[in-house]
């Protein structure tokens, strides 16, 4: 056993050793700090590299982001990059007190590497940034608009949230400052008090969500009687479907709300006959798809599907697609996708389904939730059709048609609009029936075609006000369900606060989303006969400007 003296001596030695180690560690840290300071001082004395020759930078207009610390330069958020044909992606120059700073190796985000500092591939990161830049530029154009209603923060966010993914929306939110949000909310509420009940029809209470998603209860139904499709001027209404500004509501009224079956038989029968597809199976499929559309919602209805089908066929026949002449199989794929692209739509958007934990969101893991459901419904009904609609096709034809249809329906997700536009803006124009088009390019063009057809309602002056009022009503009903569930009401979905702005909001959507898209379609395919579409958009904007704020839905 050790003596007390020996134990005290050992403890003292250990304390001395600890002090020595701590002193050494402190000295090492001090040395590192001094070295870094010296290197920084030496670096400051070096002359900054001269900026490369080129045009003088444009005069910036300062717009502060939310923390008022980082100015936006020329209307762009620092950090956004535009994709280009080269391999160099760098951040837009930041405006400092001494002028525009020059790019540094750090700002180029690992120019020589495959992976950037964010963990994304360089190509992927540049593509995401291209979408963000496009969305931000669009938001800034709205904020600079000569129409006060377009400059409202809620209008800007309403448009962006419909057409962009969450990360792109967060970039745009940096443009719309919190103070502007507050001011716009005050103006919105003050102006809307007098009309808070004007747009509330007696049946405006939001319908309860079904216990199970509609697609779980699909079953074959009897085909719509052909006699219903041939009465009350239906033939006259069908005769005008080759014109762009076609009134689908006239056909719906003439056929007893069976416009989708009537138009589908009229347009799909020729390619089906060429491909030896049974016409009775076609009739059964169209009747089943039409039945799958809910009738208790205002906008995503069977009539909307018929309108999209007519627009898609118009664009096919206007020779918009690249490559050789459209084959009957390709024509059939486009028509089937248009017919079923919103089948069983619940009347709320995917954000609502995700926030409420809807079974559809759980089933599809928050990814293209509605569009995946629409595609699933489509092929389940194709299989249920009498004799199976696709039975007469060769196996390789069925595989091709299925791949085309699924792809086109998924591309109608509005959340990927800016992604599609950023790619469309970089596509080399194709001229007429240009040979040698890669299948990937044709597949992309098919997705763009159906997405554009899905947005065609505002391009048709004769029906623009009616469709705009209906989509606004569907948004307002979702807003009521959000409030009842204790959720934040989505921007633009509050009937009491902004119901009187329904026409203005739709005009902003047409002006800043639909018009640029159709102009891009015309630019990428100059030979296509799309000028009636663009002329229709301008006339539609005038009609929305004169629409009364208290217009009832019909």
Image (tube, grey):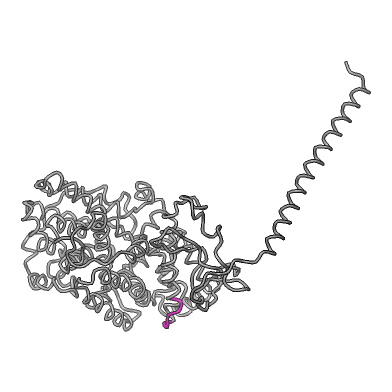
Judged left or right of residue 404, residue 74 is right
Residue 81 on the magenta span = no
- Which quadrant would residue 66 be assigned to in this image? bottom right
Residue 531, given in percent of the width and then of the height, sits at 22, 76
Residue 299, given in percent of the width and then of the height, sits at 28, 66
For the view shown, which residue lies furthest in the right direction?
5
Q: Is residue 57 above or below residue 262?
A: below
Write down the region rendered in magenta: 142-147
- Which quadrant would residue 69 be assigned to in this image? bottom right
Q: Tell me what residue is drawn at x 54 percent, y 60 percent.
A: 107
Residue 505, given in percent of the width and then of the height, sits at 37, 74
Q: Is residue 214 above or below residue 433?
A: above
**Quarter of the image with the N terminus in it:** top right
**Quarter of the image with the C terminus in it:** bottom left
Judged left or right of residue 66, residue 526 is left
Judged by its main secondary structure, the magenta piece is loop
**Which residue is nearer to you in this view: 386 or 411?**
411
* Tally of numbered tags: 0
> Is residue 506 among what the camera can see?
yes
Q: Tell me what residue is drawn at x 16 percent, y 73 percent.
A: 250
């Amino acid at each position: 056993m050790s003596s007390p003296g020996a134990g005290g001596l050992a403890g003292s030695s250990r304390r001395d050793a600890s002090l020595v180690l701590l002193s050494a560690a402190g000295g090492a840290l001090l040395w590192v700090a001094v070295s870094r300071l010296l290197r920084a001082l030496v670096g400051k004395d070096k002359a900054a590299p001269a900026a490369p020759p080129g045009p003088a930078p444009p005069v910036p207009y300062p717009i502060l982001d939310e923390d008022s610390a980082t100015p936006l330069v020329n209307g762009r958020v620092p950090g956004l990059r535009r994709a280009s044909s080269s391999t160099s992606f760098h951040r837009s120059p930041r405006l400092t007190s001494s002028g525009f700073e020059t790019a540094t190796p750090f700002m180029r985000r690992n120019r020589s590497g495959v992976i950037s500092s964010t963990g994304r591939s360089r190509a992927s990161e540049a593509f995401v940034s291209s979408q963000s830049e496009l969305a931000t530029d669009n938001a800034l154009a709205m904020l600079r608009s000569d129409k006060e209603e377009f400059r409202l923060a809620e209008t800007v966010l309403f448009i962006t949230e419909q057409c962009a993914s969450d990360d792109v929306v967060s970039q745009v939110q940096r443009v719309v400052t919190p103070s502007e949000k507050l001011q716009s909310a005050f103006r919105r509420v003050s102006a809307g008090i007098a009309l808070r009940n004007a747009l509330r029809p007696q049946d405006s209470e939001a319908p309860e969500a079904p216990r199970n998603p509609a697609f779980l209860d699909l079953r074959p139904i009897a085909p719509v009687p052909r006699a219903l499709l041939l009465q009350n001027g239906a033939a006259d209404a069908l005769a005008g479907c080759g014109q762009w500004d076609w009134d689908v509501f006239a056909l719906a009224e003439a056929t007893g709300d069976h416009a989708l079956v009537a138009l589908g038989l009229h347009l799909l029968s020729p390619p089906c006959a060429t491909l030896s597809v049974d016409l009775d199976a076609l009739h059964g499929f169209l009747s089943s798809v039409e039945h799958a559309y809910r009738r208790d919602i205002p906008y995503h209805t069977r009539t909307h599907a018929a309108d999209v089908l007519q627009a898609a066929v118009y664009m096919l026949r206007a020779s918009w697609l690249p490559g050789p002449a459209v084959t009957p199989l390709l024509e059939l794929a486009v028509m089937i996708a248009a017919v079923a692209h919103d089948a069983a739509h619940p009347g709320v958007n995917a954000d609502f389904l995700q926030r409420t934990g809807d079974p559809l969101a759980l089933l599809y893991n928050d990814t293209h939730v509605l569009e995946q459901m629409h595609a699933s419904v489509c092929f389940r009904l194709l299989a249920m059709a009498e004799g199976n609609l696709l039975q007469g096709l060769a196996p390789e034809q069925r595989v091709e048609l299925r791949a085309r249809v699924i792809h086109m329906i998924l591309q109608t997700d509005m959340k990927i609009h800016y992604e599609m536009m950023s790619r469309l803006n970089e596509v080399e124009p194709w001229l007429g029936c240009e040979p040698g088009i890669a299948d990937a390019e044709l597949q992309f063009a098919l997705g763009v075609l159906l997405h554009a057809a899905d947005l065609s309602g505002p391009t048709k002056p004769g029906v623009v006000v009616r469709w705009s009022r209906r989509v606004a009503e569907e948004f307002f009903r979702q807003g009521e369900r959000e409030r009842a569930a204790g959720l934040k009401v989505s921007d633009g979905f509050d009937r009491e606060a902004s119901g009187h702005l329904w026409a203005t909001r739709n005009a902003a959507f047409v002006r800043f989303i639909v018009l640029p898209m159709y102009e891009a379609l015309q630019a990428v395919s100059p030979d296509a006969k799309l000028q009636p579409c663009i002329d229709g958009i301008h006339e539609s904007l005038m009609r929305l400007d004169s629409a009364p704020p208290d217009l009832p839905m019909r």
